[in-house]
Image: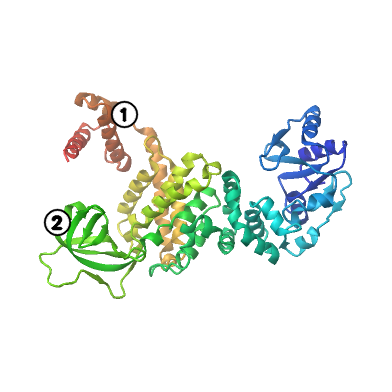
């Protein structure tokens, strides 16, 4: 009989009251030789009656489900869900989603009942809707996402009529509760062949309707360092990450901002002015850092002109121009570089816009804090490449790299109260997945990349141990003598903490070091 001893005991107890049939995934998986933790069953008693009978038998049943109620029982990771039905297997089968999930096994006799030829479809590795596919998807549009999950997990072919109907009814998924949609997407994201699932969702038209920021990455040509377009690269990065929802979701969203920031190398000349729309150089909008220092000055701007916002340049470098010796306002660089400047920050901004469309806090560890970690990972996914860019290309001073790795780990892992190794490890996993996601030089630099990541992991161990060893008595005595309190005390403590955590030559018991840091702190407050 299907199920664990716990599940079998419950079903046998119920079968004494009338016919009970195991149905759904447990029967399907049993025929595929796959163990199943959850068991679904049906019997003709009403749910209140089933609950009463199980309670009388010493069990603790729960009435669950807003969409379709069941009597559910749990023990550890084991679960049994019992639904009521008319007693007619043939009628019940036509209410189910797919034929491979409409195979019934009698608990008492072990007899298999297969009114819709689900076993035939199972052997053919085909997934087909029960009865009229349109009716099944109208009853519960979430079945469309379940179709993608099952087809991917079991490498099933989707029957043509079922697929066409799924495509037609994708817009109706918006009728489903966000929690249910998010949970199903979470199951899809942790699949081993998640890249295939993403391809099916794209073919289905799901992203075009619900996450168009992803759909527009399709066909977006990248720079010379990539072998794939932005969408194919994204799919590969998702597959490269460990099978955890947080990392898979961060990988899915990490390059959302590339469409917004896609640009070609250019030069612009003129006087930078501050307008109601921001900084401009002779009518061309500028986006970048430190623009205020160039206000009202004649300059030469080197940057990238945005493909989709051609009146905007993202700046790379600005230098003073003594005088303009030509009439050029803007010049594209022939065969100029392809840029996605600051795309990681644009991706993080888009994540904030997308999050309210779902309920990712339901499936992410930590709930809302998990959403914040997702935003952090997406916004910082380029930090490793930018920090160690030169070190990946050449083997320089290894001691300097180790010190840089320590600073990198500290900046990522310190959350203001604790050093969180997991956050660093998450970012390293995402960085690795991105690095191996179709970069031209990834194979050539892989050994160096592994060494640098190893140094960062070693730094995490060092920082964790050092944080436990710090004694703050001398520091607090020093601070009392300077009458620092409140916010200023906290700011100074963080400055000192960062220094002693990342460089072993500094000690909290050294008054000369503390005095030096205090002078630096005071000087920084003046600016």
Left or right of 489, for residue 248: right
Whether residue 345 is visible here, answered yes or no, is yes
Discs 1/2, front: 2
Residue at (80%, 62%) from the top-left corner? 120
Residue at 87%, 36% (x, y): give it: 17
Q: Quadrant of residue 510?
A: top left
Q: Position of residue 188 (x, y in %)?
A: 59, 53
Residue nearer the viewer, 500 or 185 = 185
469, above or below 401, in the image: above
Q: Earlier in the sequence, mark 1 or mark 2?
A: 2
Q: Tell me which corner region of the image, top left, top right, bottom left or bottom right, holds residue 202.
A: bottom right
- Residue of label 1: 472
Picture quadrant where residue 134 is located? bottom right
Q: Where is residue 86 in the image (x, y as percent from the top left)?
A: 83, 44
Which residue is more in the foreground, 138 or 422?
A: 138
- Where residue 406 appears, as percent x and y from the top left, is 35, 47
Q: Which residue is drawn at 12% across and 68% down?
A: 324
- Percent coordinates x, y for residue 76 in the rendering: 68, 37
The numbered mark at residue 187 is: none
Read off the residue under disc 2: 296
Quick check: 130 left or right of 286? right
In the depicted structure, whether residue 235 falls above or below residue 55: below
Residue 159 appears in view: no
Q: Is mark 2 on a helix, strand or loop?
A: loop
Hey, which residue is sitting farthest left in the picture? Answer: 322
Rendered-image quadrant of the C terminus: top left
């Amino acid at each position: 009989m299907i199920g664990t001893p716990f599940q079998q005991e419950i079903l046998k107890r119920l079968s004494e009251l009338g016919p009970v049939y195991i149905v759904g995934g447990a029967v399907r998986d049993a025929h595929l030789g796959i163990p199943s933790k959850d068991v679904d069953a049906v019997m003709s008693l009403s749910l209140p009656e089933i609950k009463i009978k199980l309670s009388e038998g010493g069990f603790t049943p729960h009435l669950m489900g807003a969409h379709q109620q069941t009597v559910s029982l749990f023990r550890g990771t084991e679960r049994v869900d019992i639904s009521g039905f008319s007693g007619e297997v043939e009628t019940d089968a036509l209410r189910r989603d797919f034929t491979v999930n409409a195979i019934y096994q009698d608990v008492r006799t072990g007899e298999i009942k297969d009114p819709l030829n689900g076993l035939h479809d199972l052997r053919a590795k085909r997934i087909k809707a029960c009865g009229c596919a349109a009716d099944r998807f109208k009853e519960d549009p979430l079945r469309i996402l379940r179709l993608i999950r099952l087809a991917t997990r079991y490498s099933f072919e989707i029957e043509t009529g079922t697929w066409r109907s799924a495509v037609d009814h994708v817009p109706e998924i918006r009728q489903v509760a966000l929690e249910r949609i998010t949970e199903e997407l979470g199951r899809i994201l942790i699949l081993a062949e998640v890249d295939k699932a993403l391809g099916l969702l794209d073919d289905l038209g799901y992203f075009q309707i619900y996450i168009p920021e992803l759909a527009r990455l399709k066909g977006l040509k990248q720079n010379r360092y990539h072998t794939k377009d932005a969408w194919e690269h994204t799919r590969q990065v998702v597959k490269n990450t460990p099978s955890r929802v947080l990392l898979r979701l961060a990988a899915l969203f990490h390059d959302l901002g590339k469409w917004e920031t896609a640009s070609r190398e250019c030069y612009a000349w003129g006087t930078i002015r501050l307008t109601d729309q921001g900084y401009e150089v002779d009518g061309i909008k500028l986006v970048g850092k430190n623009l205020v220092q160039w206000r009202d000055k004649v300059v030469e701007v080197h940057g990238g002109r945005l493909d989709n916002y051609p009146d905007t340049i993202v700046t790379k470098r600005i230098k003073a121009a003594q005088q303009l010796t030509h009439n050029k306002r803007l010049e594209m660089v022939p065969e100029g570089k392809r840029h996605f400047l600051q795309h990681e920050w644009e991706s993080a901004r888009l994540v904030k816009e997308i999050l309210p469309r779902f309920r990712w806090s339901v499936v992410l560890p930590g709930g809302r804090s998990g959403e914040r970690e997702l935003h952090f990972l997406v916004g910082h996914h380029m930090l490793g490449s930018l920090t160690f860019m030169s070190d990946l290309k050449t083997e320089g001073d290894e001691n300097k790299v180790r010190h840089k790795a320590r600073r990198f780990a500290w900046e990522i892992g310190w959350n203001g109260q604790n050093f969180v190794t997991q956050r660093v490890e998450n970012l390293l996993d995402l960085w690795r997945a991105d690095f191996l996601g179709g970069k031209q030089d990834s194979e050539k630099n892989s050994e160096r990349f592994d060494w640098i990541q190893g140094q960062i992991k070693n730094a995490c161990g060092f920082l964790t141990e050092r944080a436990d060893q710090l004694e703050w008595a001398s520091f607090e005595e020093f601070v009392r003598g300077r009458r620092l309190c409140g916010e200023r005390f906290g700011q100074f403590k963080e400055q000192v903490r960062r220094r002693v955590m990342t460089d072993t030559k500094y000690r909290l018991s050294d008054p000369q070091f503390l005095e030096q840091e205090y002078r630096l702190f005071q000087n920084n407050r003046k600016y």
